[in-house]
Amino acid sequence: MSGCLDQFSCDINWDLKRNAIASCISSALFFMGWWLMIDTAAIYTPVGQWNNVYIVVTVCGTIAMFMVNAVSNSQIRGESFNESILGTKGSRLWLMLGFVFSFASLVAALWIMFADYVLVTGDHPTWPGVALFFHNFLIFMASLIYKFGRTEELWG
């Protein structure tokens, strides 16, 4: 039985497709996160089940994703040819602020989930709170995969 797959060869070079794979996975996670947000806001009514102010948490997570991915790894390491206005320290500070906003949006979504949906007694749906945390988590994972899943030095 061990020789069943000996005739099949798997000659896929994943290193050449790393940027494309990371970008596709990241964009799929980002789309699923926002789709969950829009779907939850459309299904649950704003009276007692859902508050449309919760969209602010997702917008902050999305802005944090753009902040994290706006800085290249060569700028953080100090290897870029142009130092820009703030230099290496400024790019590291910008990256740190992006991660702070990302974690703050995750903590805010978790807080809203427990405060407004899990710990409240009575007959009410808990899925909007879970969806709020889950789509912020998907956006956070998309940000991490897009930042650290790609390579910059393809021809170097």
Image (cartoon, rainbow, N blue to C red):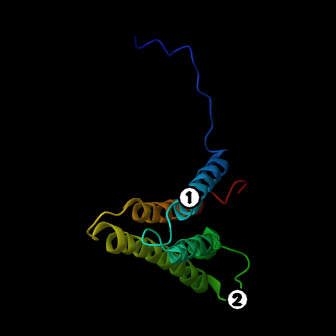
Q: Position of residue 29 (x, y in %)?
A: 56, 55
* Of residues 145 and 116, the one drawn nearer to the viewer in this rendering: 116
Q: Is residue 43 left or right of residue 150?
A: left
| Furthest residue toward bottom | 85
Task: Please give the residue where the numbered disc 1 appears in the rendered image.
Answer: 39
> Above or below — where is 18 with respect to 58?
above
Q: Residues within 10 Å of mark 1 (few under 14, many from 20)?
A: few
Q: Quadrant of the N terminus?
A: top left
* Of residues 2 and 153, the one drawn nearer to the viewer in this rendering: 2
Mark nearer the viewer, 1 or 2: 1
Residue 56's image quarter?
Answer: bottom right
Q: Is residue 2 visible?
A: yes
Q: Secondary structure at mark 1?
A: helix
Q: Residue at x 61, y 41 (%)?
A: 14
Contact (Cβ within 8 Å) of mark 1 with mark 2: no
Q: Position of residue 150 (x, y in %)?
A: 61, 56
Q: Position of residue 122 (x, y in %)?
A: 27, 66
For marks 1 and 2, the one nearer the N-term is: 1
Q: Residues within 10 Å of mark 2 (few under 14, many from 20)?
A: few
> Above or below — where is 53 with respect to 122?
below
Residue 111's image quarter?
Answer: bottom left
Label 1 to label 2: alpha-carbon separation: 41 Å
Q: Secondary structure at mark 2?
A: loop
Q: Residue at x 63, y 55 (%)?
A: 27
Which amino acid type is shown beneath numbered disc 1?
Answer: Asp
The numbered mark at residue 85 is 2
Q: Position of residue 39 (x, y in %)?
A: 56, 58
Which amino acid type is shown beneath numbered disc 2?
Answer: Ile
The numbered mark at residue 15 is none
Residue 64's image quarter?
Answer: bottom right
